[in-house]
Amino acid sequence: MANVLVRIKRAVLAGRYAFSEKARIEMEADHLTELDVVESVLNASAIYKTVRSRSPLRKYASERLYIIQGTNLDGLAIYTKGKLVSEHDSETYYFLISSKRAW
């Protein structure tokens, strides 16, 4: 699991990430910036939970979603849910499906 977090952090550090419309709406509702979310992923020490996608639109039956809880540099706890996506056999990016304040 630690290897997955390292891959996610490297993708985020390289700027290879994207936000779903849902994640953007949640960020706006919670007054979070893209930088807040990026900082929280990079500051996370572990993946909180791994779940399988329930979306009927998923690409693969075993698609895994990673839930990460971390803090931005101001200490604000942020919850994210996302998936690693591989394209062209080598390029990997982290697609954030949900990004909001952690409760």
Image (tube, grey):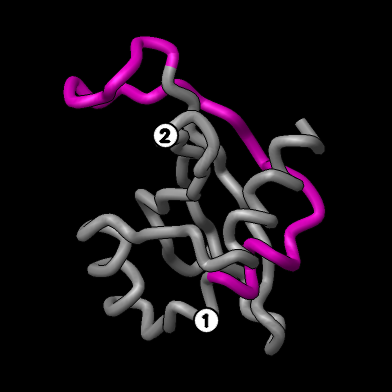
In percent of width and height, residue 52 lies at 45, 21
Is residue 59 rendered magenta in the image? yes
Q: Which residues are magenta?
A: 38-62
Residue at 41 percent across and 36 percent down: it is 87
> Quarter holding the N terminus?
top right
Residue at 81 percent across and 54 percent down: it is 45
Label 2 vs label 1: CA separation? 27 Å
Q: Residue furthest top?
A: 61
Q: Is residue 102 left or right of residue 72?
A: left
Residue type (three-letter) at the residue carrying disc 2: His
Residue type (three-letter) at the residue carrying disc 1: Leu
Which residue carries the number 1 mark? 35
Q: Is residue 36 left or right of residue 41?
A: left
Nearer the N terminus, badge 2 or badge 1? 1
Q: Residue furthest bottom?
A: 74
In percent of width and height, residue 63 lies at 42, 21
Is residue 26 rendered magenta in the image? no
Residue at 59 percent across and 29 percent down: it is 50
In percent of width and height, residue 26 lies at 30, 67
Main SS, magenta residues: loop
Which residue carries the number 2 mark? 88
Of marks 2 and 1, the one in the foreground:
2
Q: Which mark is residue 11?
A: none
